[in-house]
Structures are given as C-alpha cells and as structure tokens.
Amino acid sequence: MARRRPSHSSSPARRILLRGIAVALLVAIALYGYTFYRGWQLRDSCTGNGGEWNAELEQCTFRLALPEQSPPESTP
C-alpha cells in the first residue's frame, strides 16, 4: 500500500489568518494614504487661494492687502 504524502495546502485557519492580515494591512495603507492626501490637498488649496501654509500651526494664513492710500491733497 502506497503511503500518502501530506498535503502542502494551508489549513483553513491559516488561510483565514493570512486574509485577515492582508485586509488589515490594506486598511492601514488606505488610511495612511488618505491622511497624506488630505494634508497635501489642504496645503495646495491654501497656496492656490493666495495664502501661506504655516507648518508649525498646520493652518493657512492670509495677509490682508491694504489699499494704497494716495497722499492727502493740501487745500490752499
């Protein structure tokens, strides 16, 4: 009688574990990618609208442009 070789396929529990790890890894990559993209989008939107991105405060600042004042006209 011939002896059967052990199967090299993974057990069901191992396959479930590997799928769980793969899904968790994909979720972590997606979350990291989203936070990276969101930060980039905020900075790009800020500078695109004429602001300056303050990295320390992580916020957009705008400088108010005061209208030019003409010198006062002297009355005779």
Image: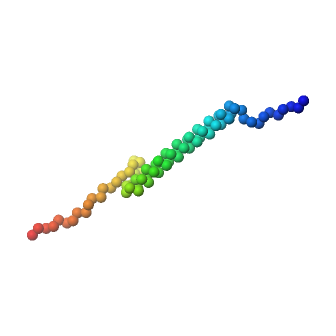
* Drawn side of residue 59 relative to residue 76, left or right: right
Give percent across and percent down for residue 28.
55, 41
Q: Is residue 57 above or below residue 24?
A: below
* Drawn side of residue 35 relative to residue 15, left or right: left
For the point 23% across and 63% down, which residue is it? 69
Q: Is residue 20 above or below residue 53?
A: above
For the point 37% across and 57% down, which residue is it? 50
Give percent across and percent down for residue 45.
42, 53
In the picture, the quarter occupied by the N terminus is: top right
Quarter of the rendering containing residue 21 = top right
Which residue lies most toward the top here? Answer: 1
Q: Is residue 73 above or below residue 25?
A: below
For the point 19% across and 66% down, which residue is it? 71
Quarter of the rendering containing residue 12 = top right
51 or 2: nearer the viewer: 2
* Drawn side of residue 57 relative to residue 37, left or right: left
In the picture, the quarter occupied by the C terminus is: bottom left
12 or 59: nearer the viewer: 12
Give percent across and percent down for residue 34.
50, 45
Q: Is residue 61 above or below residue 22?
A: below
Give percent across and percent down for residue 16.
65, 34
